[in-house]
Image (cartoon, grey):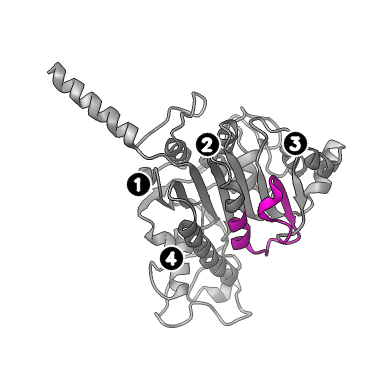
Amino acid sequence: MKKLLLVLLILTSSLWAAEKRARNVILFIGDAGGLPVISLAAAYKGQPQSLFIQHMPHVGLMDTSTASAWVTDSAAAMTAIVTGSKTQGGVLSQSDSAVRGKKDGETLKTILEFAEERGLSTGVVTSDVVTGATAAACYAHSNDRGKTGEIFAELLKPRYGDGVDILVGAAGKVLQEATATTGNDIEAGLRSSRYSVLKSLEEFRPGVGRAIVLLDSNEFDLASAVRRTTEILSHNRKGYFLMVECDLHTDRLKRGLERTLLFDGIIEQTAQTVSKDTLIIFSADHSFDTPLRRGVKGESLLPPQGTETKAEAKPTIRVDGGHTGEEVLVTAQGPGAERVRGFFPNTQLFHIMMAAYGWEAGSRSGSLAVR
């Protein structure tokens, strides 16, 4: 009996040793890109299940609730995904003891910060403002997602490593608000922290190193930004962590559907070009109320151009324009992707990424769940 147990132990240890680890993790987040939007985008394209993400080999369904509410905002949702702990609405990477705008919770270590601590390169690319909730949850900690100046100023005081290496997105008024909040010239501070502060994608070239790319509009070439970011991050032999967000809200119906198809194409292109030791995950922070109610294959799903109002969209697609609480799709490929299966909470996505790297999460974020 003892010999049998010894043999089983050796075999188990060998399997763990042989398990492939991810050197890189790319997390694609479709903001509001729940199953209603994904299914509708495929129908808009012309065929059911015609998106690349619908053919990734590993599939799960993820709860999106907050610590206290069934329906989440992006701040609480992304906090759960990148820290492994649920929090309250409007709170960025602080514990559920936080009271929005009034009281800090415990600081929660994000997966980007774990990567920084271990010497990996890190990046955040968003079609939103660079201090938007989904992006900010990766690198900042605040009891209120609306504290734009404080959030942006956190780039100057990273808790681990030297902070996020590449941040790309719309500028908004982040420089002015951060300067006003701190009383310091934030742009000068960024440059002294070895960041190149760039104002266009044309300036964002492979040789720039650490960069904050602040663009005039959120209507920039997201595919180009992702491609250039992965090229730069991949120079680090230790690997990298990258989060890419695209706004898939369908309150502006045609825009939302076309962005979903664009984002799907970016994910497919990335999957074809990055190294095989890269875990690629797609999910949404929350779902959105845009159900397909009727329609005939081969005919346009959209109302006539210029009539995309809530009332006129109802005959085929109901656009109620709000977040909803149903589970969202998670699809994955690459080392560690096999852990994406079944139903699981949004906190589990953090553990899936950590396990793919082969890292322990530590006591604050809970025990590492390897499934």
Q: CA distance from mark 2 to mark 4?
A: 30 Å
**Residue under the point 55% across and 43% down:** 241
Q: CA distance from mark 4 to mark 1?
A: 19 Å
The tag earlier along the polypeptide, 2 or 3, is 2
- Tell me residue 202's x, y (percent): 72, 61
Question: Of helix, strand and loop, which one carries label 2?
Answer: loop
**Residue under the point 20% across and 20% down:** 6
Near mark 4 (Cα within 10 A), the count class, few <14, some 14-19 or many ≥20, is many
Identify the mark at residue 51; answer none if there is no mark: 4
The tag earlier along the polypeptide, 3 or 4, is 4
Asked if residue 214 is among those painted magenta in the image, a careful observer would answer yes
Q: Quadrant of the C terminus?
A: top left
**Residue under the point 56% across and 58% down:** 322
Three-letter code for the amino acid on which mark 2 is drawn: Lys
Q: CA distance from mark 2 to mark 3?
A: 26 Å
Q: CA distance from mark 2 to mark 1?
A: 20 Å
| Marks 3 & 4, CB-CB < 8 Å contact | no
Q: Quadrant of the N terminus?
A: top left
Question: Of helix, strand and loop, which one carries label 3?
Answer: helix
Identify the mark at residue 148; answer none if there is no mark: none
Tell me which segment is drawn in magenta: 202-228
Identify the mark at residue 86; answer none if there is no mark: 2
Identify the mark at residue 156; answer none if there is no mark: 3
Question: Of helix, strand and loop, which one carries label 1?
Answer: loop
State which mark lies toward you, 2 or 3: 3
Q: Which residue is mark 1?
A: 341
Three-letter code for the amino acid on which mark 4 is drawn: Leu
